[in-house]
Amino acid sequence: MYKSPRTGDISRRGLLKGATALGAAGLILPASVRRAAAEPKRGGVMRLALAAGSTTDSNDPGSWDSQFVQILGTARCGYLTEIANDGSLIGEVAESWEASADAATWTFKIRDGVTFHSGKTVTPDDVIASINYHRGDDSKSAAKPIVAAITEIKADGNAAVFTLDAGNADFPYIMSDYHLPILPSKDGKIDPTTTDGCGGYVLDSFEPGVRAKLTRYPDYWKPNRAWFDGVEMLAVHDSAARQNALITGEVDVIDPVDLNTVHLLERAPGINIMSVAGSQHYTFAMDTRADPFKDNNVRLALKYAIDRQEMVDKVLQGYGTVGNDYPIGINQRYFNPDLEQHSYDPDKAKHYLKEAGLDSLKVQLSAADAAFVGAVDAAVLYSEKAKAAGIDIEVVREPNDGYWDSVWMKKPFCAVYWGGRPTADWMYSMAYAAGVPWNDTFWDNKKFNELLIAARSELDADKRRQMYYEMDDICANQGGVIIPMFANYVMGLSDKIAHDDTVAGNWTLDGFRGVERWWFA
Amino acid sequence: MSDIWIMIAKRLALGALTLLVISVIIFSATELLPGDLAQAVLGQSATPETVAAFRRELGLDLPAYQRYVNWLFGALQGDFGTSLANKRPIADLISLRLGNTLFLAVYAAFIAVPLSLTLGILAALFRNTVFDRAANAMALTSISFPEFFVAYILIFFLAQSGLFPSMARVDPSTGFTEALYHTFLPALTLTLVVTAHMMRMTRAAIINLLASPYIEMARLKGMKPMRVIWRHAVPNALAPIITVVALNLAYLITGVVVVEVVFVYPGLGQLMVDSVSKRDFPVVQAVALIFAAAYVLLNLLADVLSTLSNPRLVHRK
Amino acid sequence: MHTLITLFWVAVAIALAMGAGWLFLAAARRLTRGGVARALRGAPVSAGFGMLVILIYVLVALFAHLIAPFGERQVVGAQFLPWDGTYLLGTDNLGRDMLTRLIYGARNTVGIAFATTVLAFSVGAMLGLLAATVGGWLDQVLSRIVDILMAIPSLIFSLLLLTIFGTSVVTLILVIATIDSTRVFRLARSVAQNIVVMDYIEAARLRGEGLWRLITREILPNALAPLVAEFGLRFCFVFLMISALSFLGVGIQPPTADWGSMVRDNAALITFGDVTPLLPAGAIALLTVAVNFVVDWMLHRASGLKE
């Protein structure tokens, strides 16, 4: 039995039960949506309205920063690996893979019979050229940091062999990243402007910032995927315009749904709301080098002065779960169930302030809706609730424009969005290890850093789990990040759209793959 | 009459100068904004090395004045370059959207200008009556609402019932009548937004003249009120009316980004906003210059017409 | 039937508004003396209604902290609570009292709009009249500067300026006033151009009247009507500008209540037939109509028409 997120007061524990029952994917759907699942069938043109997409978008995978091109890229292209809807890793262009004993050398066997839309067969050379495009000094790819650990890639028969600078038990997960599609190579290089790919849909036309049209690739190698005959993607930035398009039947799927009016959209006939708990989380990052955040007592005081449940209720309208100041969601591996949940407690906050030698605290919190939808509202709520703990938070609304350049990692206390990553190692290495480029709290914890490296190449599951649990604890109680909430991915679907009972939570729209996984009932 | 031609020639020359100054202002403003294209495109995932590589490839590491001069020489030869973000030629990027923007502006103007002038004249004729008050109150209410709000109300009443589409989706293959149907709601929204301003100015300019001795004279001759206004008041009230109409027409071309967003209409405004946020300065420059040129030309037209409407100005000593 | 009921209530509202306007005028005529009373005697009911509304807004703005049932930024309960005895107009998306936000919104919004418009008009009208009267190179320089500023789309231009200079209330007022003053300049100049060629101006010039006197005594009074009409509209355009700017994320700093941002925050509800966004939008509309009714009356007086 699944409660509708609106009516249900989702406590973390309540949701946890549901998630365990479902396995790895934390899907919460009203019963009506689940009933729609039936035998998949082919046909129809799926029209999809997204809140993303800019006139400056391009086909270059190194620049895919908006969900429009990320979903378009995933429809058009194939990847070495794929995160299945149950959260497990399955092969796509790679049929199988194996690691050396130290997990520093990985061999990916390339699947037979995978072809590009141009007709060319996918070879290990294409794989090597596609990944190499993001590496090297001249790379201007956003994915450069995640492939930085690769020291060499070479072909070995029908396999591609990756050598890393150190062991990494989760390396195959990284190869599923949306920046790393397999594209056709020529003379050892890919053409980043190509419209070719080996995915389920052929790109017919693409007008950046407006629309893209795709048709099914008849020779697609997956027999049970890509059900729609065609897909039309539209960039619709205004949330009311998206909702109206869905209500009037001009589109079949909208992503995301405006949470402020979702309770009204739910009542519209012929529309289902899909809400999927994932790794997406919203944070308030404190610069741990700067006063007053240098003192962990101040950080703890701020962590106890935030009313997490109120934020989930008012900013996410219940479509989310409370966070516990470390970036692992309840449906992910290495979510630490034994860790004490931080909750709103002004007395405790006052206590920690006193420990820091302070009676009161005055800080500025920078926020803009560019950080995440509702960031300014969340900051205002935080400021109201923190008063009771003697903490005066002045909310500074920053311009949306240029938020990531001039506010994030520049201002000592600001609102941040994280899409989350499929593995704990990936998430922690990207934003919490000392000195990495996206460590937005400038945090440097010796014990944490040691554990992170040790856990990465640890192949014993139990030992590894204990290490991550300890890291979760250190991050929550000594880290510089406040994570008040994990936000669900919330989409609006016409009731004609059908899908599996399980929907992926690694990205929105069924892990960006709703286009090839869903069908018309 | 030759005075007019000299004036037009002068103004065109000045207009060209205006465009040059604007290109400098826009360029400097884009430079003053925090961050550059490399950081904007990479967003949250920017690292120092990738940003540096990006800048090298696009020539963003050159000093600002050099980039401006390079751009200017290209532009003077008619080559506006390519978008830095996706390498598409700017001419391709803009042509379709310019057509869309002009189509919507002309469509809205065709409804709004006659409507507001008629209402304005009627309101002046029946001044201080219930009709005047009601027309005023309605027009004022419609402009007190932000554009997106007017659009939502129209969508609620006219699109959700299925009368008109809520998204104004047009592409080059859309036929003319079909395009009129698809863009009816955005055109109506813009009409509601600009009508009140023009209508009230018409009314005010006419009422302002009604106490003049020559109007009094005409009235005493026994002329019908409508004829007095049409023959004597309107011609002399033209200057301020034309100015306001020109301002609103320019607005219909340059200021409709909000309406474009709500109705998902691919026009120039959205392109400009996107390009500003990505610091794609060749595109920003090109769009800004189109907007500026539209504005300069409309104003020139307004000034010429105002001058022609006032014989005293034509023969100014 | 439904339309009939709506029409009935609209008629009742109009009748009440007219009654209130008439009562206000009657009271005002009794309470005032001399010139003001004489002026009021000729005022139509609509002007009375306009003045009454403006007076109420001013009182609400001045005494917001006394009238409002809760604090401006206070979170009082759950979000989107319906209208009831405690929360007369319900609560907003963060659980703040809607009525309180509206009352404080009057103070912030009307204050900012008034400051901006007055600033824009003092600068714009003066420079416009000056340019038209002096002519020559001064006119050329000012007109070209204004042309350049106006040729840049205002929303984009203010977005650029606010991003560069920050978004405090003072910069917001300065930026919007600067952009608005260019519009006022053009209008003032074009109206004054028609006046400066009049014979009485020639005569005044020949009399040797100084520039300041010429502008304030001879030209301004005759250019006042279109300027006053423009003032009424510009005033409400400031609300819209703030609303549009908050659409682009650079509006007034939270948690300050202002109507423009309140419309923006709740606008999508209207597409579901929920009337919440009509409250702040209606507050703006009512003020706009009221201001312009008074402006109409002043226009009428300025035109010298006797009827």
Image (cartoon, coloured by chain):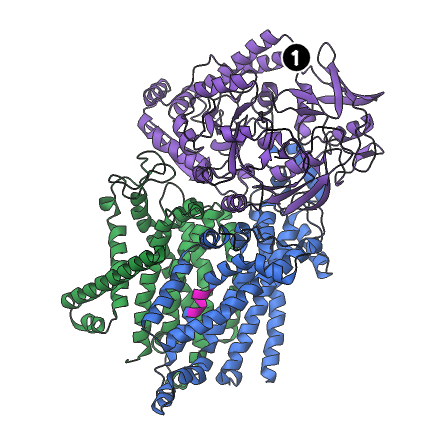
Chain colours: A purple, B blue, C green
* Front-most of residues C77 and C140: C77
> Residue C22: where, in percent of width, then height?
21, 66
B144, above or below A418, in the image:
below
> Residue C120: where, in percent of width, then height?
41, 61
Magenta stretch prevailing secondary structure = helix
A460, above or below A436, in the image:
above
Q: Quadrant of residue A386?
A: top left
> Split into 4 quadrants, where in the image is the N terminus of chain B?
bottom right
* Front-most of residues A357 and B42: B42
> On the picture, is A371 further left or further right than B16?
left
Residue A440 visible: yes
> On the picture, is B85 further left or further right than C241?
right
Q: Amino acid at mark 1?
A: Ser
> Residue A340: where, in percent of width, then height?
43, 15
Residue A66 visible: no
* Front-most of residues B267 and A388: B267
Q: Residue furthest left?
A: C30
* Front-most of residues A9 and B276: A9
What chain does badge 1 belong to? A
Residue at which label 1 appears: A457
At 52% across and 54% down in the image, what residue appears? B259
> Residue A492: where, in percent of width, then height?
53, 37
> On the picture, is A204 further left or further right than A338?
right
A469, above or below B179, in the image:
above
The region drawn magenta spans B195-199
Does the magenta portion include A354? no
A343, above or below A189, in the image:
above
Callout 1: few (<14), some (14-19), or many (20+) C-alpha neighbours within 10 Å? Answer: some
Does the magenta portion include B198? yes
Secondary structure beneath dot 1 equals loop
